[in-house]
Image: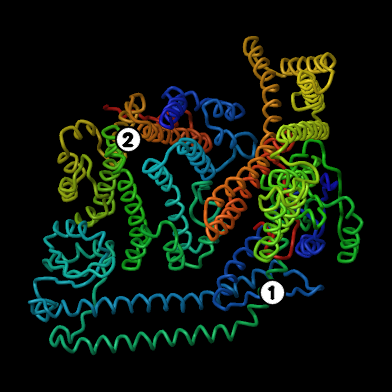
């Protein structure tokens, strides 16, 4: 019964996904018609930012907050009929935004920023919020903040990050430990679903985690110049397409080209034409979106279709953000369209 | 008592430098509910920095007070003034300094605690280290080709670290686990030592401080451990003394800080709603009861001697939904208010259901649970628990008393029907009459709710709905006609024709209204009108029948008692007594609970839902105490 409800709900929501030409049209919508255009596309949270002149001048921060509020609104609707491991997974999926709040708070403490300024930058989590942001923002320094966080719902993730930070006092190690802790938690929550729901859900998780791992690997290895062993340690423990052994081999390569050449043949085909990390990311994201679209339009179990919808919706909203931010910055329509290129050229 | 007090929207303009004193005066005044300022000409937010400083200072103070324990009642002198922004910022800086001093002691304490548990773990692992068949002195030599580390890391990361270190030719040998920490030896080529440093830091690796004695004379290591412990204790004692010193040094001033922050609270709280200003001017907006206007002027004159401008107006029709509701209740009615508010707050101007709720709730409870004995037990229990239950105990006392009253009317005491003769009727012997009375009560109740709804709609300016909708007067006409028709059919009255005409008139009016209200195509309009009109009849019919449960529960009460007597009569004397006692407890707890919920359900769903949207805003005055503050 609940599954039928969720399936219907996801099917209805899937009508809100954007086609590429619709982004094109959004670039040229006049300011005064923007609120209406966004409402018609099922984005009331974003439309609210365009219903007055002062709101039209919203900054990137409030735009980001509205986009996430929209995602949380839709997730809340889909979470309603779920229980058990599916509910657990989807709830934790939204915790990404709260972990990002934790990072914002930590950075604000490192730069000795005023609590009010940090609070204004946080993403409003609504019913999904599990942290007392007021209390955390008023911690005096990073040490106090970490200890307070350790007494909260993300204790497991934060404890490890604190230890790493105490050893190195490097903000990078704090961020990396938080990210890794979060995604390890996500894969742990996905495992029972992969067993019960099967291939459709697993394929989505595999695309998602493999993409993160490959992009992190390239970034840590060639942008931050970290040694292979450390790079491997910082990746998410994976049971998907790129196994631990393969990740070790990839991390040991000396250049981006060598990493791409060492990938399995199917991956090489998927990434052909990529010459830099954003190119790799774009191609992998495109492949993940294609797979999510297949799952969404299949008769896969409701939770798999829900997850596929959320992946696609987030991708769409990132493109909407690019359009709105581009307009806000006064960029030429051609430049915005160039930035919107969602299908990699060689694919 | 039946509706909210008339309010006025005020805009109090004053010098920005006096805004904190104005907010303090309004908080002392006690009936000012801050609201957003709508003056477009005042574009600045002069109280925002004040609120920011206050929030920071308050957070620091509460953490400090947690350490000092100064949380007793606070006496605010009558003439005390609120601190200005500069004073507040200075106070905030001072509190920051004190808290940083405390925090460093606190952090040191935490680190000492951490080190202590590490030492404990080390002691446990020492024995194992001693048994390792290796020459530690040789292994740990700084100039050897092999880099060796002994230490701990979180157990969850061990496998990952092992795999990662293997990439650099390092080996990990685990030799102990204490809690979530794994103790291990890590060894590998010293030439690649730099490569693993970052990895180990990232993994939370903590090197064990292996004492020199352990390298050469393992048995001497325990002495080293003891010395380390003594050093920790000394450090901890020193930190405690520093904390005590801080408490002694700053205690009195912290109390003063508490006082000043309490005085600053009103402006910080009002800033949440939005204090606006421009240049040297600030404006506070909000709602006050109309009858308090002169008292407010008196308060402001006494403090500001004319250095203010008070602009006031009645709430406009468009903003009624945002106006808070302030209803004053007599003390005896207050225990029932949480039950009403758990459904919702009445909108400004709406009929307040608290008084009819209290009477009807008690009446329904008594009618469904009428028993002198059981009522007395509920009354006594509520009276005994009055301290624990607070005001809610009075609901129990009143329910018990009404239950006793109905017990006298029904002639029932602890389920016995033969001891008291009924003053009115016995549900068991006259069930049809009880059912008829329950439905009759339901009809009266629904008529009352339809009238109240019509009144609320008129107040809200929706005259059309009040006159023609299914929950307005047209619905009432239909309902009275339908009731008259059914009663005539049952032979209770002879008004079939006029009642039928009345019902027909009502339903046609409702259908016509639904037709005009439906903004859709012809097909959808026909469908909406037909379904909604049909729904009107079904709803009113089912709502009326819902009141049959009142009779059903009064019969159920007697039936339950009879079942217990039947069970008890089959047992010996001791069993008989025990069954009667346990049975009565079951009746009081189980049936009493069910009846309490059913009475509430009838009130909420057959009553409130008909006329009470419950989406009003509660009047929350600016106060000095933190309990009712909205920050």
Quarter-of-image position of residue A307? top left
Which quarter of the rendering shows the C terminus of chain B? bottom right
Q: Which residue is mark 2?
A: A285
Q: Position of residue A179 (x, y in %)?
A: 35, 52
Mark 2 crowdedness (10 Å alpha carbons): few <14, some 14-19, many ≥20: many
Q: Quadrant of residue B541?
A: top right
For mark 1, name the chain: B
Q: Tell me if A90 is positioned left or right of B141 in this view.
A: right
**Point 35% across, 64% down: residue:** A165
**Mark 2 and mark 1, same subunit?**
no
Q: Residue at x 81, y 31 (%)?
A: B454
Q: Which mark is residue A119?
A: none
Q: Label 2 vs label 1: CA separation?
A: 60 Å
**Badge 1, how many Cα within 10 Å: few under 14, some, many 20+?**
few
Which disc is residue B73 wearing? 1
Asked if residue B451 lies left or right of residue A192, the reply is right
């Amino acid at each position: 019964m609940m599954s039928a409800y969720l399936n219907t709900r996801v099917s209805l929501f899937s009508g809100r996904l954007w086609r590429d030409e619709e982004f094109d049209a959004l670039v040229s919508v006049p300011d005064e018609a923007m609120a209406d255009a966004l409402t018609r596309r099922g984005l009331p949270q974003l439309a609210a930012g365009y219903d007055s002149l002062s709101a039209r001048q919203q900054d990137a921060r409030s735009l980001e907050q509205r986009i996430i509020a929209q995602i949380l609104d839709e997730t809340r609707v889909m979470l309603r009929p779920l229980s058990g491991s599916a509910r657990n997974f989807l709830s934790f999926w939204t915790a990404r935004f709260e972990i990002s709040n934790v990072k914002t708070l930590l950075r604000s403490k490192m730069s000795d920023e005023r609590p009010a300024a940090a609070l204004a930058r946080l993403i409003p989590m609504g019913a999904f919020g599990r942290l007392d942001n007021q209390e955390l923002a008023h911690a005096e320094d990073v040490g106090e903040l970490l200890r307070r966080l350790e007494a909260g719902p993300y204790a497991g993730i934060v404890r490890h990050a604190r230890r790493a930070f105490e050893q190195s006092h490097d903000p990078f190690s704090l961020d990396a430990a938080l990210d890794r802790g979060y995604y390890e938690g996500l894969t742990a929550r996905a495992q029972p679903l992969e067993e019960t729901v099967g291939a459709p859900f697993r394929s989505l998780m595999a695309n998602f985690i493999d993409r993160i791992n490959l992009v992190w690997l390239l970034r840590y290895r060639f942008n931050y110049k970290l040694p292979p062993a450390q790079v491997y340690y910082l990746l998410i423990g994976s049971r998907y397409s790129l196994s631990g052994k393969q990740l070790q081999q990839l991390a040991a390569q000396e250049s981006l080209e060598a990493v791409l050449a060492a990938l399995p043949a199917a991956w090489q085909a998927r990434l052909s034409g990529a010459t830099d990390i954003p190119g790799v990311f774009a191609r992998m994201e495109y492949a993940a979106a294609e797979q999510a679209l297949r799952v969404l339009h299949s008769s896969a179990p409701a939770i798999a279709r829900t997850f596929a919808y959320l992946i696609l919706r987030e991708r769409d909203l990132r493109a909407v953000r690019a359009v709105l931010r581009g307009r806000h910055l006064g960029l030429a329509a051609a430049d915005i369209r160039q930035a919107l290129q969602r299908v990699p050229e060689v694919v | 008592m039946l509706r909210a007090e008339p309010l006025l929207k005020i805009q109090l303009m004053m010098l920005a430098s006096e805004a904190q004193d104005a907010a303090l005066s309004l908080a002392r005044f006690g009936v000012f509910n801050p609201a957003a300022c709508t003056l477009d000409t005042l574009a600045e937010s002069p109280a925002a920095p004040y609120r920011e400083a206050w929030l920071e200072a308050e957070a620091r103070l509460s953490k400090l007070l947690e350490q000092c324990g100064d949380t007793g009642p606070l006496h605010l002198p009558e003439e005390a003034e609120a601190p200005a922004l500069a004073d507040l910022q200075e106070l905030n800086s001072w509190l920051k300094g004190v808290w940083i001093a405390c925090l460093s002691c606190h952090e040191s304490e935490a680190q000492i605690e951490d080190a202590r548990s590490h030492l404990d773990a080390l002691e446990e692992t020492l024995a194992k280290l001693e048994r390792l068949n290796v020459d530690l002195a040789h292994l740990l030599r700084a100039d050897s080709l092999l880099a060796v580390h002994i230490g701990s890391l979180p157990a969850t990361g061990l496998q990952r670290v092992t795999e990662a270190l293997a990439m650099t030719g390092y080996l990990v040998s685990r030799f102990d686990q204490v809690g979530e920490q794994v103790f291990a030896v890590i060894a590998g080529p010293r030439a690649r030592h730099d490569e693993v440093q970052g990895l180990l830091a990232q993994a939370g690796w903590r090197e064990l401080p292996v004492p020199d004695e352990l390298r050469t004379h393992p048995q001497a290591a325990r002495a080293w451990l003891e010395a380390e412990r003594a050093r920790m204790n000394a450090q901890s004692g020193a930190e405690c003394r520093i904390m005590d010193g801080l408490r002694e040094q700053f205690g009195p001033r912290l109390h003063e800080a508490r006082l000043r922050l309490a005085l600053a609270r009103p402006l910080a709280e009002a800033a949440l709603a939005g204090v606006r200003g421009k240049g040297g001017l600030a404006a506070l907006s909000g709602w006050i009861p109309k009858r308090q206007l002169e008292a407010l002027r008196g308060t402001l004159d006494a403090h500001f001697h004319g250095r203010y401008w008070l602009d006031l107006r009645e709430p406009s029709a468009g903003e009624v939904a945002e106006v808070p509701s302030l209803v004053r209740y007599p003390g005896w009615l207050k225990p029932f208010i949480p039950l009403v508010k758990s459904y919702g707050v009445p909108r400004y101007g709406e009929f307040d259901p608290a008084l009819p709720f209290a009477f009807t709730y008690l009446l329904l409870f008594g009618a469904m649970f009428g028993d002198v004995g059981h009522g007395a037990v509920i009354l006594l229990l509520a009276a005994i628990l009055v301290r624990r239950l607070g005001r809610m105990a009075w609901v129990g006392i009143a329910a018990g008393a009404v239950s006793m009253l109905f017990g006298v009317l029904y002639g029932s005491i602890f389920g016995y029907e033969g001891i008291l003769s009924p003053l009115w009727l016995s549900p068991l012997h006259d069930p049809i009459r009880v059912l008829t009375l329950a439905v009759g009560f339901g009809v009266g109740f629904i008529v009352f709710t339809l009238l109240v709804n019509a009144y609320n709609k008129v107040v809200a300016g929706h005259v059309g709905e009040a006159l023609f909708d299914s929950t307005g007067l047209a619905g009432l006409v239909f309902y009275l006609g339908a009731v008259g028709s059914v009663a005539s059919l049952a032979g209770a009255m002879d008004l079939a024709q006029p009642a039928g005409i009345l019902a027909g008139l009502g339903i046609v009016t409702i259908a016509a209204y639904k037709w005009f209200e439906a903004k859709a195509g012809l097909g959808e309009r026909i469908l909406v009108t037909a379904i909604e009109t049909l729904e009107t009849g079904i709803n009113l019919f089912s709502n009326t029948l819902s009141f049959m449960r009142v009779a059903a529960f009064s019969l159920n009460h007697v039936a339950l008692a009879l079942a217990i007597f039947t069970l008890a009569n089959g047992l010996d004397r001791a069993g008989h007594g025990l069954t009667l006692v346990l049975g009565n407890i079951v009746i009081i707890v189980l049936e009493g609970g069910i009846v309490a919920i059913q009475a509430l359900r009838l009130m909420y769903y057959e009553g409130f839902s008909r006329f009470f949207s419950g989406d009003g805003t509660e009047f929350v005055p600016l106060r000095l105490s933190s309990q009712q503050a909205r920050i």
